[in-house]
Amino acid sequence: MIRISDTAADALRTLLERKGGGTDAGLRLAVRRGGCAGWQYEMKVAPPEEGDEVSDFEGGRLIVASDSIEKLDGCEVDYVDSLSDAGFRILNPQATRSCGCGTSFETAGEPAPDPSEVEECGNE
């Protein structure tokens, strides 16, 4: 199960009102191979696809891609708005290491990614 902070829920409601995307759209989260730590988060406003996990809350919807449910289980989505950056952040208790920019991570028990499959983030 994935949670969303009150701050992130407010930001998501505002985003969905602005972007639209259809009545069944929400913030769709996925994990893909890549990034400088091995796995990277992918977020977009989109409708759910078959098998996705959907969490509805007042005025919004959080969607987890079916192939990413295991890697995102127990996560919390938060929203940060600071002088240098603003956006959704995923707090992942399964991450044993994150890259400097916070967009990619590594989990315990997985082999290190092949260097040819890894993208540089520019912050390390």
Image (tube, helix red, strand yellow):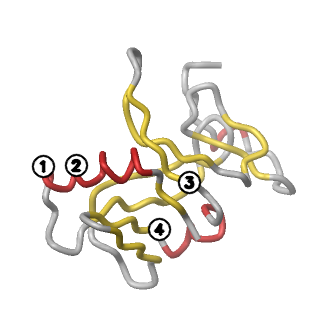
- Whether pointer 2 and pointer 1 mark residues with C-beta atoms closer than 8 Å, the reply is yes
Q: Amino acid at mark 1?
A: Arg
Q: Position of residue 97 (x, y in %)?
A: 75, 39
- Secondary structure of the residue carrying numbered label 2: helix
Q: Amino acid at mark 3?
A: Glu
Circle 2 Cα neighbour tier, 10 Å, few/some/many (<14 / 14–19 / ≥20):
some
- Front disc: 4 or 2: 2
Q: Earlier in the sequence, mark 2 or mark 3?
A: 2
Q: Earlier in the sequence, mark 1 or mark 4?
A: 1
- Whether pointer 4 and pointer 3 mark residues with C-beta atoms closer than 8 Å, the reply is no
Please state which of residues 80 and 31 is positioned toward the viewer in this rendering. 80
Q: Is residue 67 above or below residue 113?
A: below
- Distance CA(mark 1)–CA(mark 4): 21 Å
Which residue is outermost to the right?
109
- Distance CA(mark 2)–CA(mark 3): 18 Å
The residue to which callout 4 is attached is: 64
Residue at point 54% right, 47% down?
90
Horizontal relation, residue 34 to residue 44: left or right:
right
The residue to which callout 1 is attached is: 18
Q: Is residue 117 above or below residue 50?
A: above
Q: Earlier in the sequence, mark 3 or mark 1?
A: 1
Among the 4 quarters of the image, the one containing residue 122 = top right
Circle 4 Cα neighbour tier, 10 Å, few/some/many (<14 / 14–19 / ≥20):
many
- Whether pointer 1 and pointer 4 mark residues with C-beta atoms closer than 8 Å, the reply is no
Q: Is residue 99 above or below residue 41?
A: above
Q: Position of residue 16 (x, y in %)?
A: 20, 56
